[in-house]
C-alpha cells in the first residue's frame, strides 16, 4: 500500500495548477479552476496538493502533519465516472473526526458532484490520516487532493483559531 507523508507549503503558480488539472474533462476542469481561484483569493495558501494514483476499490492513505489552532480547507476531486467515494480524516487516539460518502455517478448513470470539501480547525498537533476510497470500474481512476491553510491578509502564517 502506498502512503504519502506531507509537509510544509507548496508554492504553486497558476500554470502549475492548470497543468495539474489538464487531464480532467473540460466541465470538471472549469469547476476545479473556479474552486482554486475562490480559496486563493480568500486568504488561503496551498499547504499541499497532489494528483493521486489510486486503484479502484482500494483505500489510499495520506498522512498529514497538522498544527493545533490552524484552519485547513480540504478539497478532493474524484473521477466523475466513479460510483461511490468514501473519505475519512482521523488521528490515532482520537478516531475518525470527519467522514464523508458521496456518489459522483448516480444509479441512473447521471453525473453528480465529483468533489468534496470541508474546513477543519486542528484541535491537536500531530500526524493525521486521510483515507480515500473510490468504487469504480476504471483501472486507473483520476483523483486530486488539495489542502489549503488559512493565512493572514498579509500572507503570514501567524493566524490561529480555537474551538
Image: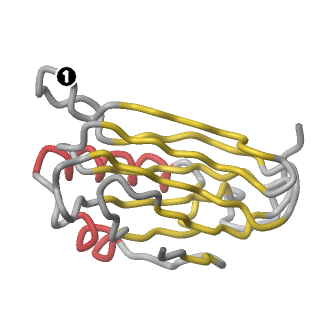
Q: Measuring 21% from the left and 32% from the top, which residue is drawn there?
A: 105
Q: Residue furthest top?
A: 108
Circle 1 SS class: loop
* Position of residue 140 measured from the top left corner of the image (x, y, whole percent): 21, 65
Q: Measuring 21% from the left and 44% from the top, which residue is drawn there?
A: 80
Looking at the image, residue 93 sits to the left or right of residue 19; the answer is: right
Number of marks in picture: 1
* Position of residue 94 measured from the top left corner of the image (x, y, whole percent): 84, 48
Looking at the image, residue 87 sits to the left or right of residue 33; the answer is: right
Q: Name the image quarter holding residue 131.
A: bottom right
Up/down of 109 relative to 145, above or below: above
Q: Name the residue carrying label 1.
A: 107
What colouring method underlies this structural image? secondary structure
Q: Nearer the viewer, residue 26 or 125?
A: 125
Q: Measuring 25% from the left and 60% from the top, which residue is drawn there?
A: 142
Q: Nearer the viewer, residue 6 or 20?
A: 6
Crowding at mark 1 (Cα within 10 Å: few <14, some 14-19, many 20+): few
* Position of residue 75 measured from the top left corner of the image (x, y, whole percent): 47, 50
Up/down of 64 relative to 135, above or below: below
Quadrant housing the C terminus: top right
Q: Measuring 46% from the left and 33% from the top, which residue is drawn there?
A: 101
Q: Name the image quarter holding residue 91.
A: bottom right
* Position of residue 124 measured from the top left corner of the image (x, y, whole percent): 88, 55
Amino acid at each position: 500500500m502506498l502512503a504519502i507523508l506531507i509537509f510544509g507549503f507548496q508554492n504553486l503558480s497558476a500554470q502549475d495548477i492548470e497543468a495539474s488539472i489538464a487531464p480532467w474533462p473540460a466541465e470538471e476542469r472549469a469547476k476545479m479552476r473556479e474552486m482554486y481561484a475562490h480559496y486563493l483569493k480568500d486568504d488561503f495558501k496551498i499547504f499541499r496538493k497532489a494528483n493521486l494514483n489510486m486503484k479502484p476499490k482500494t483505500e489510499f492513505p495520506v498522512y498529514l502533519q497538522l498544527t493545533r489552532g490552524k484552519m485547513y480547507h480540504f478539497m478532493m476531486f474524484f473521477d466523475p465516472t466513479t460510483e461511490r467515494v468514501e473519505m475519512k480524516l482521523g488521528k490515532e487516539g482520537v478516531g475518525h473526526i470527519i467522514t464523508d460518502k458521496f456518489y459522483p455517478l448516480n444509479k441512473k448513470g447521471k453525473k453528480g458532484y465529483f468533489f468534496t470539501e470541508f474546513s477543519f480547525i486542528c484541535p491537536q498537533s500531530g500526524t493525521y490520516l486521510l483515507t480515500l476510497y473510490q468504487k469504480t470500474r476504471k483501472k486507473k481512476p483520476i483523483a486530486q487532493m488539495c489542502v489549503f491553510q488559512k493565512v493572514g491578509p498579509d500572507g503570514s502564517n501567524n493566524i490561529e483559531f480555537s474551538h
